[in-house]
Image (cartoon, rainbow, N blue to C red):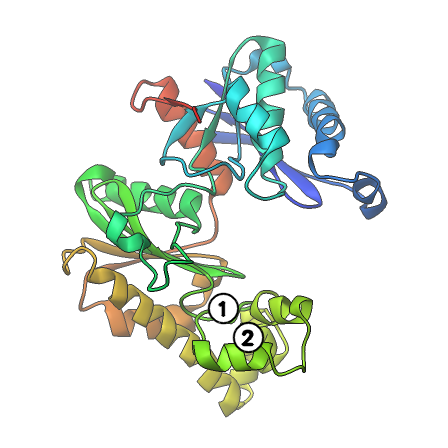
Amino acid sequence: MKILVINPGSTSTKIAVYQDEDCILSKNIEYASEEINKYPSTMMQLQMRKDSIIQTLNVEGHELGSFKAIVGRGGMLPKVKSGAYLVNETMIRRLKENPMYEHASNLGAVIAGEIAELINVDAYIYDSVRVDEMNEVARISGMPDIERTSTCHALNSRAMAIKTAKKVENRYGELNFIVAHLGGGISISVHEKGHIVDIIADDEGPFSPERCGKLPCKNLIDLCYSGQFDEKTMHKKLRGQGGLVAYLGTNDAREVEKMIAAGNEYAKIIYEAMAYQIAKGIGELSTVVKGKVDYIIITGGIAYSDMLTTWIKERVEFIAPVEIIPGEYEMEALAFGTLRVLRNEETAREYTE
């Protein structure tokens, strides 16, 4: 069965064609900044992006009529369950008219739906960025004004847990996992018998290459009202200019390891501190399932770092076996999830409000 996968980013659209489990085409369609900037909103890029996808498929020799299904990256919907949803008019209307946030991923379902309509097949989203299956007790923050919500790398994290379960000849829904996704931002999630029941988001846990993570609240409030920085600058200090960037001037873990190899002790302390905080987060989430963790998974781009993953593993392997799965597998996750629906191994939900 042939599946078209669509994953819009801020200045590009990744597409892939899968024939069952085999990826037979992978393309990153990039757009010039002047092309993107002429649209007042992300959703207004819809026709341009859709045309570029169809044109690319034509050039690569893939007729639209050859696809069994289309899957797009799920956008900023209200809370949804994990797994597959059929793209319907209610979902498209919400993403077009009233998404939770403006984000390129909002285009995924809409483009998938429009292309699917052209060839009379179903369109899906899978493991939207808004997957939220947290327990009610996990939503309590300590301040009634703020409710904790699930914001993590759900797509790749669930895919790696499913992959690990298959590797050990078991089912995802029968095991407990803790998954640490290490990228520009770091999120950690605990999966209890097939559901992400709690998370540590990228602003409440370990610092990362670009984000500062959890901070002492009183000191942060003092800094916000110190008069040194405006609101926009403070947001940048938290996301984009925090973490490794703030301490070492780079968001590239490979550059940090070069500093360490050259004898930079300060760089070593900072890098080890990041591993230390990731391990603390894993330990924290192990309490959610009362220590009954079957596997710990470390994934994402920085999981290629043997130095970092060794430091983490040394601190957490007493909890459960540790699986290192470097990289991101979003396109594969979207395709494989859709394939399970087509094979009746999973059932797609109907989106309602």
Q: Residue at x 22, y 61 (%)?
A: 286
Q: Nearer the viewer, residue 154 or 168?
A: 154
Answer yes or no: is residue 156 visible. Answer: yes
Q: Which residue is mark 2?
A: 244
Q: Picture quarter containing residue 5?
A: top right
To which quarter of the image does residue 182 belong? bottom left
Residue 330 placement (x, y as % from top left): 48, 42
- Kindly state the secondary structure of the residue where label 1 is placed: loop
Residue 50, quarter of picture: top right
* Quadrant, the N terminus: top left
* Proximity of marks 2 and 1: CB atoms separated by less than 8 Å: yes
* Distance from Cα at disc 2 to Cα at disc 1: 6 Å
Work out whether 44 lies above or below 151: above
Q: Secondary structure at mark 2?
A: helix
The mark found on residue 217 in the picture is none
Q: Indicate the position of residue 14 as horizontal and vertical percent values.
A: 62, 38
Q: Can you say whether 336 is above or below 144 in the image?
A: above
Residue in the image at 60% along x and 79% along y: 225
Q: Is residue 157 left or right of residue 249?
A: left
Looking at the image, residue 85 lies above or below residue 231:
above
Q: Which mark is residue 208?
A: 1
Residue type at mark 1: give it.
Ser
